Amino acid sequence: MAETSRLPAPVVEEWDWQRFGACRGRESAVFFHPDNERGLARRHRDDEAKKVCARCPVLTRCREHALAVEEPYGVWGGQDEDERRAEVLARKGRNRTKGRRHAA
C-alpha cells in the first residue's frame, strides 16, 4: 500500500493534473496487474500501459507523484513497479551519499 503520509493535501490544485491523463476513462486493468499475472502476459500488459503513458500530457507529473508517494502497484508515469522501486532506491542512496559528504 502507498504511504499516505507522503500524499499531497486534498486540494484540487494538487490533483488537477489527473484530469488530463491519457489513462483517464480507461480500464484500470490495463495499468494494474491481476493476481498471479506473470511473465509475458505481465510484460505485454505493462507495455500496453506504457504506450498510453508515452503520449500522455501529464506523464512527468504522474511519474513525480508515483515516485514521491512510492506507489507500490501499477504503471504510473510510464514506469512499472520495478522501475519505480529501482529509482526510489537510487534516489535514497544518492541522498545518503550527499549527507555523508557534508558530515566529514
Image (cartoon, rainbow, N blue to C red):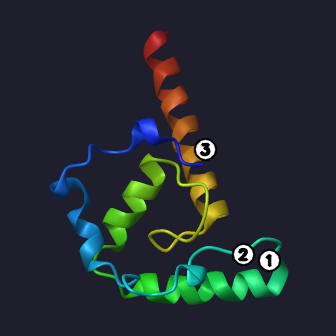
On the rendered structure, is 57 left or right of 68? left
- Mark 2 — residue? 34
Residue 54 in the image: x percent, y percent? 43, 84
Left or right of 9, for residue 25? right
In this rendering, position of residue 34 left or right of residue 88? right
Label 3, label 2: how far apart the Cα atoms are: 25 Å
Q: Give the amino acid at mark 1.
A: Glu
Residue 37's label in the rendered image is 1
| Mark 1: secondary structure | loop
Contact, mark 1 vs mark 2 (Cβ under 8 Å):
yes
**Residue at the spot 19% in from the left edge and 50% down from the top edge:** 11
Q: CA distance from mark 1 to mark 2?
A: 6 Å
Q: CA distance from mark 3 to mark 1?
A: 25 Å
Marks 3 and 2: which is nearer the front?
2
The dot on residue 56 is none
Q: Which residue is mark 3?
A: 89
In terms of image quadrants, where is residue 82?
Answer: bottom right
Q: Where residue 25 appears, x then y in whole percent?
A: 38, 86
Amino acid beneath label 3 = Leu
Could you tell me the amino acid type at mark 2? Answer: Pro
Find residue 92 and report its horizontal and vertical position in percent: 54, 37
Mark 3 or mark 1: name the one nearer the start of the chain. Answer: 1
Q: Circle 3: is it few (<14), some (14-19), or many (20+) Cα within 10 Å?
A: few
Q: Indicate whether 29 appears above or below 2.
A: below
